[in-house]
Amino acid sequence: MLGVSFLEALAAAVPPGRIFRDADIMAAHARDQAAWAPAGRPVALVRPQNPEQVRAVVAACAEHRVPVVTRGAGTGLSGGANAVDGCVLLALDGMDRILEVDEAEQLAVVQPGVVNDHLRAAAAERGLWYPPDPASSPWSTIGGNAATNAGGVCCVKYGVTRDYVLGMQVVTGMGELVRVGRRTRKGVAGYDLAGLFVGSEGTLGVITEVTVRLLRLPEGPPKTVVGAFGSLVAAGRAVAATAAAGITPSALELVDRYCLRAVDDWKNMGLADLGNVLLLGRVDTGDEEAAALRACFDEAGATWSTRSTDAEEAEALFSARRLAYPALERLGPVLTEDVCVPRGLVPEMLARIEAHAKAHAVHIANIAHAGDGNLHPLIVVPEGDDEARGRAQAAFEAILDDAVALGGTVTGEHGVGLLKKRGMRAELGEDVLTLHRAIKAALDPAGIFNPGKII
């Protein structure tokens, strides 16, 4: 039971009306979108308005050894933002101002609660572009994207969040507000602490401001190439052929028939009859590369292929990819994988996923950022079927082990959180985990930041 002294210290850290202890309100913010990850019971939800209030809240929690779990929009898929018992939930979605967009330097400075698509829109008004585009971009926040090193459709060519974070302001475990990183395009003074915080999932500190680099908007509309395949393995061969040909599309996405049917049932888009598996490719360098990509599809065994005839058609196909996950959620609880393997081994990994579906008698739908080997097998389980849930969990763990065995990783972009802790231990080994723990102890000596996550 928390003493009155802590609650008084917490109340002194923020203005009146920023602390919530209603059980229903706290429960609504106690977990992210990982339906299978456990969540604890927080003692309070705090909504700070500025970095100084964040600093004061963290200082109070550090003094009283109260855990701090930071959350943005709660769109994560690994349980990384789930509450732990007795914690303070620090909700930063209200710190949502775009502080600066500098056209000359091609950068933006934002608060952590800025929604990804809002930053992209503000940049576009100035002829600039923020490339990282997770499927949750209409809702997810830049702070959350940075905390998980979010990826997305464009990342096969343009990179992930870490490639765009120049600097940030953070609150450390000692309750100090510091700036790490830089604003310049180059800079090698000291360790890359900004890069260290990217992907740390709230375990090292609280991000209160992010400086990101921007690119110029691409000239001209992209070209979209679509290929239909009879099986996942055949589509995987096309992905491997694309990589072998030296083609780097700006997007290369895989969607299977099960996902297309789920989208059709929800949005009536008429996509399920196009093929068993679709590859959606996008290039932004001209007709020659589009033709080469289509040739890779055909040579790998596409049952048909085509190029989009207009921008509206192309966007409809990619919107189906983005809608796949929420469409599947309507069918029952979804256990979401996020493994990444070398591109040449995509066919092998897809074959192993199919084998695990049969071995464990579960249905696994497949979407993927196939161009960079980032696969998202989605295990759909009937509501309330505990026996099926157990089989799904076994398939989930087997897929993690196969990704590691093929020289890949257990998480390409969703983060470790709670669901991937065993897999990460298998991937990294005890020596590397010891380094992780040493870094954690240095930056968070009281051990208050998101305890029990990652390590």
Image (cartoon, grey):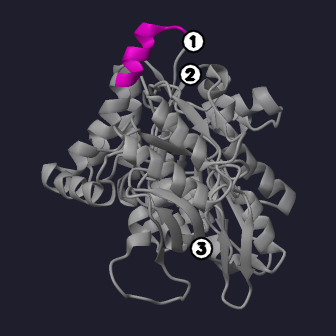
Image point (68%, 46%), residue name: 322
x and y percent of residue 171 in the render?
Answer: 47, 60
Q: How dense is the environment of label 2, judged by Cα within 10 Å: few (below 14), some, or many (20 and up)? A: many
Reply above or below: 235 against 87.
below
Q: Which residue is drawn at 27% across and 50% down?
A: 406
Residue type at mark 2 is: Pro
* Bounds of the magenta segment: 383-393
On the image, which quarter does residue 67 sit in?
A: top left
In this figure, which residue is indicated by the disc labeled 1?
383
- Which mark is on residue 211? 3
Residue in the image at 74% along x and 58% along y: 117
The image shows residue 23, relative to residue 271, as above or below, that is above
Q: Can residue 217 be seen in this view?
A: no
Q: How crowded is mark 3: few (under 14 residues within 10 Å), some or many (20 or more)?
A: many
Q: Which residue is drawn at 58% across and 49% down?
A: 13
Q: Does the magenta stretch include residue 389?
A: yes
- Residue, disc 2: 333
State yes or no: discs 2 and 1 in contact (Cβ < 8 Å): yes
* Image quadrant in which you'd find residue 265: top right
Residue 445 bears which disc, if any? none
Left or right position of 426 against 89: left
